Amino acid sequence: MFTPAQQILRMGFGFALAQALRVVVELKIADALAGAERTAEELASAGGANPDALYRVMRLLASEGVFREVSPRLFAQTELSAALRSDLPGGPSDFVRMINTEAYRSFGDLPYSIKTGRTAFERLFGAPRFEWLDAHPEQAALFQRAMVSVSQGANEAVAAAYDFSTARRVVDVGGGHGQLLSLILRRNSHLSGVLLDRPAGIASAKAGLGGPLSRTEFVAGDFFEAVPRGGDVYILKRVIHDWDDGRASLILRNCREAMTPDGSVLVAERIIGEGDDQDLNKYLDIVMLAVVGGKERSKPEYADLFLHCGLRLDRVIDTSADISVLVARAA
């Protein structure tokens, strides 16, 4: 049992756990342990690491249940570490790598964000997060793969939650690799789709990262400037949370102006809980603050945001995953 002071110390050492996870992902330790126990020396030899240093990382992660130390310096897989295998489709390994590089450095300057309300990322890297990714293709590709892992289950849940039977043309705004749109089109053979994203996202979609996209028009563009016109449904999944209220309003206004008179805007987001209940979204909210300048929002905050954009919140659809669909129509 930890004392209050010890619990605080454990929380303060969270950075060590995060970077330890990054190390074992980059060394593919979970791959090496698939189907067999391995010593620290064997794992270090396979990954090109120092045996004693790697053992200390493995020992820490084993204390958290990520691995199991069967006997001194001999390790086995657990359910947690098995999820880090690089051959696991949609697993969290790419997200662990992504969040522990540029984003991790941004958290070292979190006091700047708290004092100014601006992103530490832009201060450190000289450009907003998404502009920086446009100029760094390798990191942009990692980001797209990480978003696939974050979206596991959520895209399926969103595609199943909304009734598209009366729609004809769906525009996925900021749809990235296109997995959500692919699932929607697969479930609704009468629909045509439009995928709007930055060039890196469109490249990932055309490469098939998110699945097949027949009946789809690909548009590389900027949703702050305009979105494709004439859609019955405009869907924004995990897009609005990336931006402050001013920028988010601009995106929503563009959708409002482009949609058909009886069209709808679907905002698929995790809705942040109120009060002091534990909520992963409260962690993500701080990531938004320090890295991209956005925010996680409560249901009332989304309703207010819609009203400023000529929209009204019609209803909120709960899904089978940790994401909701907020349906907005013309006010």
Image (cartoon, helix red, strand yellow):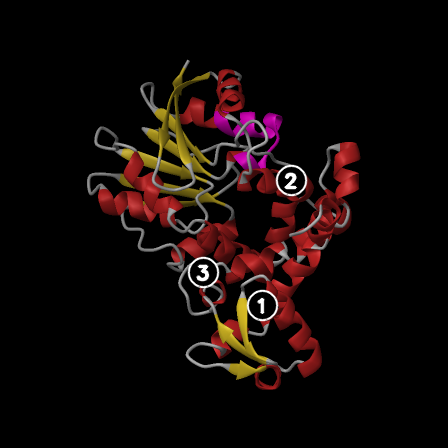
Q: Tell which circle, 2 or 3, labels the residue nearer the N-terminal end.
A: 3
**Residue 203, percent from left and from top:** 46, 56
**Residue 221, percent from left and from top:** 50, 42
**Mark seen at residue 62:** 1
Does 247 lie within the magenta span?
yes
**Mark seen at residue 91:** 3
Classify 61 as above or below 310.
below
Q: Secondary structure at mark 2?
A: helix
Label 2: few (<14), some (14–19) or many (≥20) C-alpha neighbours in 10 Å: some
Does 313 lie within the magenta span?
no
Q: Quadrant of residue 247?
A: top right
Report, in whole angstroms, how far the alpha carbon at label 3 lies from the one at label 1. Answer: 20 Å
Q: State which mark lies toward you, 3 or 1.
A: 1
Name the image quarter holding the C terminus: top left
Q: Amino acid at mark 1?
A: Ala
Q: Tell which circle, 3 or 1, labels the residue nearer the N-terminal end.
A: 1
Q: Amino acid at mark 2?
A: Ile
Seen at 31% across and 41% down, the residue is: 159
Label 3: few (<14), some (14–19) or many (≥20) C-alpha neighbours in 10 Å: many
**Mark seen at residue 85:** none
Label 1: few (<14), some (14–19) or many (≥20) C-alpha neighbours in 10 Å: some
**Mark seen at residue 286:** 2
- The magenta span reads 241-252
Residue 89 makes an appearance in the image: yes
